[in-house]
Image (cartoon, rainbow, N blue to C red):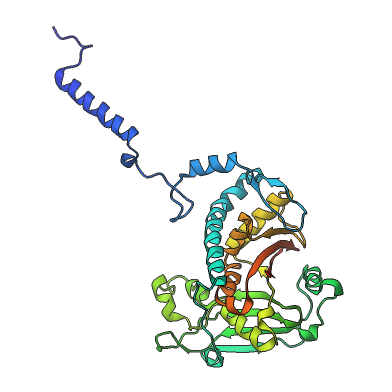
Amino acid sequence: MVDVHKPAPLAAAVFALLALALLLFTTNPGLRPLQRDHTSSSLTSRSEAAFDQSLNSHAKRIALPFGHHDVATNFTSLPRSVQRATKLNYQYAACKGEKLWKQIQDAFDGQHPPGRQFGSNDFANGWTLTPVTGGLGGLPAGWDNAFRTFAGANNQVPNPNAISNLNLFQDQAFLNSQGNLVQDPTTGRYNLLYIPSYNAMVARFVESPSYRVAHRPPGQQPPAANIPDLIPPLHRLSDVSWYIYGRISPNPGGLRYMGHHFIGNPDTVGIIDRLLQATFDTDSPNVPWPGASFDIETEAAKALLATPNGVGVAYLMMDRAAALGRRRPRVNVWNGNGFRSMLWDMVPVP
């Protein structure tokens, strides 16, 4: 008679092997399946669950250089929809900004090669420069007080006649870095206000050549590896703005302020909104000037430095360190009438 409650020898052996496999699987992390990690390809040390736990267990402290709103802020107090939309991009940007700030400091110490010096021939290679008639044509929304900050004790906004409002279009055929003729313009565009009397530049519209090529209509987008061959050698905002400012200002090395208005890049907008909502403990990101202020040593400033609208400031300080000298930047972000703005004050260090 067979005892149905007693496993047969073969069944017992199979059961034992399965138990051993389960034991090894649960105790050896190398045998576990990879956990999905949304942070980024360079931030794979923690799973999303571990990241959430870490984020929930620590209040992020934002150190504000001007003394206002210097409070311990818990980023998880934001609505869950905002957290899901921005927290992973923010964490990646903060790590990237940390590396950028280290590279900038190396450049200040002479450990980074200077940026390429572009000339008039580079601008003639596919670019068209068009002054906007009528000077400024009115200050951007919310920037009147920011310009008064530039003025300091004078408390005056710049005379429109002292502002060069210039459009730069990449609208012609050009020679790429290999010397090959590219017939299809990128349609990149930079519109900046150059204000040398205030040591300032403000970008009003920025779509770089590489951005325009990468965001061509479906079916026309080239592989990422091919983009360098489809853009002119002069293509970065930091190089374009530095060259023009150097031709307008009698003291290019005195440049101190670099701003962005009409920010529309979704990554930058997401991080700005996150910081404004967390700093002011509000569900609305509509916070006018001066908004939130962050010193470069804070996590928030490093995240902003790594955004598409902040990285140009990073490369400007990095590539032009010899002319600018050592700086300790700080940044204001605000949202006036639905238009996000960012203003970097590259404070000289004695």
Q: Is residue 122 above or below residue 62?
A: below
How many marks overall? 0
Could you tell me which residue is drawn at 81 percent across and 74 percent down? 151
Q: Is residue 303 above or below residue 259?
A: above
Could you tell me which residue is drawn at 57 percent across and 49 percent down? 84
Q: Image quadrant of residue 183?
A: bottom left
Could you tell me which residue is drawn at 68 percent across and 63 percent down? 331
Q: Please give left or right for residue 211 compared with residue 179 in the image.
A: right
Q: Nearer the viewer, residue 39 or 312?
A: 312
Q: Nearer the viewer, residue 249 or 288?
A: 249
Q: Please give left or right for residue 296 compared with residue 140 in the image.
A: left
Q: Image quadrant of residue 325?
A: bottom right
The single residue placed furthest to the left in the displayed view is: 1
Percent x, y of residue 99: 52, 61
Percent x, y of residue 346: 67, 70
Q: Nearer the viewer, residue 294 or 1?
A: 294
Percent x, y of residue 280: 74, 50
Percent x, y of residue 142: 78, 67
